Structure formats: C-alpha cells, structure tokens
C-alpha cells in the first residue's frame, strides 16, 4: 500500500512537469505565427505573390496548430509546400543542387541495365498483356451468377 501511495504522489508531481515539457516541445515544433510563416515563405520563394502566400496559409494544406488562440505553423512547412507543388521544389536552388549531386548519379546506377541488377524489376517493370477465358459449369457458380477471380 505504501508503494502505491508513493507511486501516485510521484505521478502527481511528474504529470505537470511532463505537460509543461510537452507544451514546450509543441511550441518549438510550431515556431511560426502567420506573419513569420509568410516571411519565411517569401524569403524562400521571392517570386511568390502575396495572394499565393495567403492562399497557402489559409489552405489547410500546411501542418499547423492553434496555441494560445494563434495559428502556429510547423517548422518544416516549406518542405511540405515543395512536395505538394513541384514547381516550388524546382525553385529551391539548394535542394535542386543536392538533387543533382546525389540523386542523379544514383539514378544512373539504378537504371543501368545488367542482368544481375536487383533493382531492375522496380525500375523497368516487365508488362504482359493477354486474354483468358474460363468455362465454369453453372451449378458450380454462386447463386447470383458472378464468379470473381484475381489474376496477378
């Protein structure tokens, strides 16, 4: 019984500390208010119009939370934007430089046609087209007359 009381007292002391830590973690993960997010957006995409920036912020496509009655945007919301709209991705000079440096050489290796390459079925899949028919006696069919078959 004594251990249970100590345990419960410990929970009472830890819970507020945990809640406070959790609040701070959320606040750190969502550091931008609307105006700050707009500035980050316009800094990253200088050709973006104010209307487009406003549309993004109001679209609901960007991860956000409301903290103390204020909408806060996720720290990496630019990445989300670039993956939703690829034209923004192509405007990101730093990201495109890494893409050219790291991914394009890797892509060439993957696409290299060799019989021993384990990547080939995923890069250059083989497709077959064919026709098939089946004759199933009526008494073997379900009552509604439909027989479903899956052929991979």
Image (cartoon, rainbow, N blue to C red):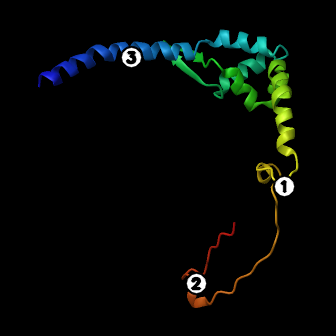
| Residue 15 found in image quarter | top left
* Residue at position x 16%, y 23% in the image: 3
Count how many numbered circles sit on residues in the image.
3
Instruction: Count neighbours of disc 3 (C-alpha within 10 A) and say few if under 14, some if 14 to 19, many if 20 or more.
Output: few
Residue 48 is situated, as x and y percent measured from the top left of the image, at 82, 17
Front tag of 1 and 3: 1
Identify the mark nearer the N-term, 2 or 1: 1
Q: Which of the pair 105/147 is nearer the observer? A: 105
Q: Is residue 77 visible?
A: yes
Q: Which residue is mark 2?
A: 141
Instruction: Count neighbours of disc 2 (C-alpha within 10 A) and say few if under 14, some if 14 to 19, many if 20 or more.
Output: few
**Label 3, label 2: how far apart the Cα atoms are:** 61 Å
| Residue 55 found in image quarter | top right
Q: Which of the pair 118/45 is nearer the observer? A: 118
Q: Which residue is mark 3?
A: 19
Question: Tag on residue 115?
Answer: 1
| Residue 59 found in image quarter | top right
Front tag of 2 and 1: 1
| On-image quarter of the N terminus | top left
Secondary structure beneath disc 2?
loop
């Amino acid at each position: 019984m004594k251990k249970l009381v100590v345990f419960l007292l410990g929970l009472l002391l830890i819970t507020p500390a945990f809640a406070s830590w959790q609040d701070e973690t959320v606040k750190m993960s969502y550091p931008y208010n609307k105006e700050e997010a707009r500035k980050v957006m316009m800094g990253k995409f200088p050709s973006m119009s104010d209307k487009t920036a406003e549309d993004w912020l109001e679209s609901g496509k960007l991860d956000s939370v409301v903290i103390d009655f204020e909408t806060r945007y996720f720290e990496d919301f630019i990445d989300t934007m670039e993956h939703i709209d690829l034209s923004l991705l192509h405007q990101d000079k730093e990201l495109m430089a890494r893409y050219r440096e790291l991914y394009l050489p890797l892509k060439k290796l993957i696409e290299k046609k060799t019989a021993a390459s384990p990547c080939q079925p995923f890069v250059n899949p083989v497709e077959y087209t064919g026709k098939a028919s089946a004759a199933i006696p009526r008494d073997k069919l379900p009552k509604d007359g439909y027989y479903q078959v899956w052929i991979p």
